[in-house]
Amino acid sequence: MGIRMWGETDVRRARAAVLVAATAGLLTRMIIAANSPGPADVRIFAGFAKAITGYGPVRIYAHPLPGLPVYNHPPLAGWMLLGLDRLTELGFSFATLIRVPASAADFACAVLVFEIVRRRATVRTAMLCGIGVAVSPVLIATSGYHGNTDAVAVAFALAAAHLLADRKAPLAAGLAAALSISVKFIPVVVIPALFVAALRGGRPVLVRFTAGFAGVTALVWGPALVTVPLDLTHNVLEYAGGSYRLWGLVRFADVLGMPEPVIAFMQGGGHFLFVLLCVAAGIRLAWLRPAEAPGVVAVTLGLLLLLSTASGLQYLTWAAAGMFVLGPVEGFAYSAVVGLVAVLGYSGRSAVRWSEPVLYLGAAGWFVLAAGLLTGARRILATPPDTLPAERATVSAPRTEFRSCSTVD
């Protein structure tokens, strides 16, 4: 096949197509948000917002909340909920407002994934991946209907990797990394890998990344750590997730009839072992291929979902955008299978009571995720360690339309 060099005009057109798809996706999410009550989490968030208005986003961790679950969200989420509650005084619906941050994050992620992938594959592949994020049924369901903060945290984590590896902006990358764990603590598994990637970039890069990360962390987390350190630690840092057995390892253990103490250990203290495994995998990949930081973040977050001992439809967001970073085949396969899990799960009687077909689809989605992570990690490791994404994009080699974003051009 002949070589086709993509110029700036092609990039602008592809970016415009992604923006159109992202805009359509955002409108779709907001229509769903404005016309549906959402799951129980919407009402729980409304209760959290009222409590934060009364106690403040710092003291909230020290107060019992009758009728509400434990408040396990990082400090920045509290300030967000406080702002949303203030907006309800102007006549806005909280049920709609709570879906706005995640929906906007999906818009940003579609553009972000396009920018990440176009540096590592053909522009057409990047366009497909960006559009895939915009129309992903997983993200439409979890952001437009559920409205949790997972998508926001993932967007900041991918932005941090992109800023560090592709934009050569370590200070801004550190800011984004700190913001990711300040809205939801899940991306903490990618923070060590980002520090390793910064270290591999040289001392000035590490210093600037650390400065950005430390500055935001001190600003956002500092007041709560000083005022209510034990409550913050118990509610947020030690939170292990729910005890449902709907997904992944605990689902398989339950089906196989493993002893209850084993499953209880997996969902209790044992889950930290799986977290450490994810952290170790991210560190190893970042050390070997620091220029592939976006892919490393995608693999690490996907591995966290794969090994998660907690079950929740909103958790499916963790891997949705990242799978498109790893490649369009991986992204569309995950979105198709797991998208059915999300849509059917939210359409059932309860988001935490999956029907038998949904449970089977969830098991299939787990294997699709595992296969995508395996191929994605292999392609990252197949990338020459001594070339940067921008350099690989100009290599004169035949291109295919569905090359992985980590494949050398």
Image: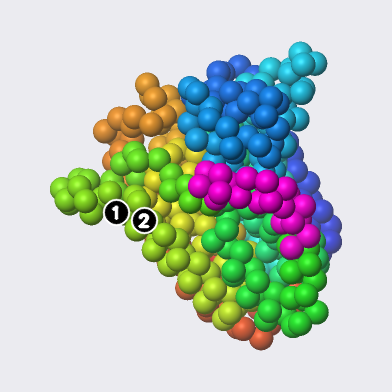
The answer to whether residue 101 is above or below residue 208 is above
Q: Main secondary structure of the magenta part?
A: helix
User: From this viewpoint, which residue is outermost toward the top?
Assistant: 91
Question: Measured from the top left, where is residue 113 in percent x and y?
Answer: 66, 55
- The colour scheme is rainbow
* SS at circle 1: helix
The 10 Å Cα crowd at callout 1, few under 14, some 14 to 19, many 20 or more, is: few
* Residue 61 can be seen, yes or no: yes
The answer to whether residue 222 is above or below residue 117 is above
Question: Measured from the top left, where is residue 243 in percent x and y?
Answer: 35, 41
The circle drawn on residue 265 is: 1
Question: Measured from the top left, where is residue 405 in percent x and y?
Answer: 60, 65
**Residue at 59% across / 38% down in the picture?**
61
Which amino acid type is marked by label 1? Phe
Which amino acid type is marked by label 2? Gly
Q: Which residue is mark 2?
A: 269
Q: Is residue 405 magenta?
A: no
Nearer to me, 223 or 183: 223
Q: Write down the region rendered in magenta.
A: 214-235
* SS at circle 2: loop
